[in-house]
């Protein structure tokens, strides 16, 4: 099959596909997104124009037109943008800012001056309406992807461990929106042109729109030819980079001679950002302790009068750089719970270093409620104020658990342990020890204030739903 003929077949396949992001339901969904963006933009601009007495109609029409133009120009209807909130919001900010600037310039040229107050209020309101509209659509897209109604028919190129991990991940998580319909082993082809022909043929036969290539699994010259030919044939090409659990925002692609290389932004654990994190931790903890003080007193009384023993449970945990500290919790178990632990280990829900038991007989009746609502963790706000913990960070470990850690896992000690973290909001008690390791290290390697805020928000939702807590 020649390249020209392959390209034509691929083009026909893309045109006829009815169940991928290139066509069918997803294509229609993006048209509806455009329509709701138009209605939202027109509605907010029209309403604010009527509220301001000194605003004509030409200026608002210009602003509305420039908004819609820059939404398209900034790629805000591409599937890749719709799946990454941070990228979408960045582009949305750019589009509104460019629309604002374009309206000012056009107004100056035609002699139509808009009041500064109207322009600023309208720009902010337009952003808010469009962002809210896209959150609604994001929720719908995620639901459709999760049920397999929207996906990319994908050819996976590679037979190395990296490709196997990609295949397993995409199969286990349909919400990512990829359906691997065929795999090609590049080691089966001695020459690059044969590999290209095979992949193009698979794309055409399977109606695929995307080729996901394990870059480390393909010889350099064959990889370059494959990418060029696939793009020329209208296939979306995505290359994995052999990096796992590195936040994409930390990667910047730049040229190094003939090679595009990715620069990995370091994590800054010194300077202003850690200071800002500490200030946020202390202020937030003090505010919460003040606001929740009536609840804390009620819980303390309930613990004291429903079972013998102290109100607070104190336990030695390992903090930053391996330093020990006494972590505080409301007592949720009988007073001699530690003495009973060894006898219960054989009944644990897993053999990981983290002891978890769904029907732990040591938990008191009040304690079960406190655990389900995570109220038992609130005294750790005092640990945060003292500087022993943070609001967000890896789970503070027992020193006995560290005996079973891999050398890699010791990296979690580079930051303060937290009351909540990625592991807690990703299934909480249901998450496996492998997840515990991966998510904690991901947090340590990719920490940011924005990530902390997102985790705190997810924690609130997880607590409300009692996800995985026992």
Image (cartoon, rainbow, N blue to C red):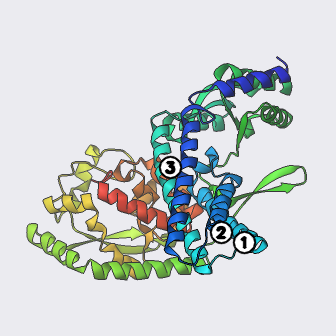
Q: Quadrant of residue 462?
A: bottom left
In percent of width and height, residue 447 lies at: 56, 65
Given residues 198 and 401, the one toward you in this image is: 198
Given residues 470 and 277, the one toward you in this image is: 277
Q: Is residue 156 left or right of residue 355?
A: right
Q: Secondary structure at mark 1?
A: helix
Residue at image mark 2: 59
Circles 2, 1 touching at the beta carbon (< 8 Å):
yes
Using the image, tell me which numbered label, if any, was put on residue 138: 3
Chain-order first, disc 2 or disc 1? 2
Chain-order first, disc 2 or disc 3? 2
Q: Quadrant of residue 271?
A: bottom right
| Crowd around label 3: few <14 · some 14–19 · many ≥20 (10 Å) | some
Residue at image mark 1: 107
Q: Secondary structure at mark 2?
A: helix
Judge depth for marks 2 and 3 and give the one in front.
2
Q: State whether residue 162 appears in this view.
A: yes
């Amino acid at each position: 099959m020649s390249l020209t003929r392959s390209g034509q077949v691929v083009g026909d396949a893309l045109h006829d596909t009815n169940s991928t992001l290139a066509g069918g339901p997803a294509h229609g969904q993006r048209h509806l997104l455009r329509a709701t963006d138009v209605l939202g933009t027109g509605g907010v601009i029209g309403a604010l124009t009527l509220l301001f007495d000194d605003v004509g109609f030409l200026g608002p029409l210009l602003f509305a037109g420039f908004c819609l133009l820059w939404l398209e120009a900034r790629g805000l209807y591409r599937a890749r943008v719709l799946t990454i909130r941070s990228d979408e919001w960045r582009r949305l900010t750019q589009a509104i800012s460019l629309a604002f600037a374009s309206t000012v310039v056009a107004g100056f040229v035609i002699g139509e001056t808009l009041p500064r107050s109207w322009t600023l209020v309208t720009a902010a309101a337009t952003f808010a309406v469009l962002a809210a509209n896209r959150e609604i659509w994001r929720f719908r897209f995620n639901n459709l992807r999760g049920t397999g109604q929207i996906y990319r028919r994908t050819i996976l190129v590679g037979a190395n461990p990296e490709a196997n991990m990609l295949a397993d991940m995409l199969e286990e998580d349909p919400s990512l929106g990829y359906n691997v319909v065929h795999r090609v082993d590049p080691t089966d082809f001695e020459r690059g042109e044969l590999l290209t022909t095979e992949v193009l043929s698979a794309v055409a036969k399977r109606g695929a729109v995307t080729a996901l290539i394990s870059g480390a699994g393909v010889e350099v010259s064959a990889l370059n030819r494959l990418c060029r030919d696939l793009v020329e044939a209208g296939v979306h090409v995505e290359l994995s980079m052999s990096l796992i659990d590195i936040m994409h925002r930390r990667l910047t692609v730049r040229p190094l001679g003939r090679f595009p290389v990715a620069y990995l932004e370091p994590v800054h654990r010194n300077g202003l950002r850690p200071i800002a994190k500490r200030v946020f931790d202390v202020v937030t903890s003090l505010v919460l302790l003040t606001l929740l003080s009536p609840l804390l007193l009620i819980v303390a009384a309930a613990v004291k009068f429903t079972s013998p023993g102290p109100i607070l449970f104190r336990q030695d945990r390992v903090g930053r750089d391996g330093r020990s500290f006494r972590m505080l919790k409301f007592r949720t178990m009988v007073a001699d719970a530690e003495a009973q632990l060894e006898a219960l280990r054989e009944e644990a829900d897993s053999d990981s270093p983290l002891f978890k038991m769904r029907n732990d007989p040591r938990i008191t009746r009040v304690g079960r409620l406190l655990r389900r609502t995570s109220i038992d963790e609130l005294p750790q706000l005092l640990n945060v104020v003292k500087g022993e913990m943070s609001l967000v960070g890896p789970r503070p470990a027992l020193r006995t658990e560290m005996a079973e850690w891999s050398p890699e896992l010791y990296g979690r000690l580079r930051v303060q342990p937290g009351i909540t973290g990625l592991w807690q909001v990703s299934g909480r008690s249901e998450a496996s020890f492998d997840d515990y390791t991966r998510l904690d290290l991901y947090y340590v390697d990719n920490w940011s204030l924005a990530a902390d805020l997102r985790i705190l928000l997810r924690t609130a939702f997880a607590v409300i739903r009692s996800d995985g807590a026992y």
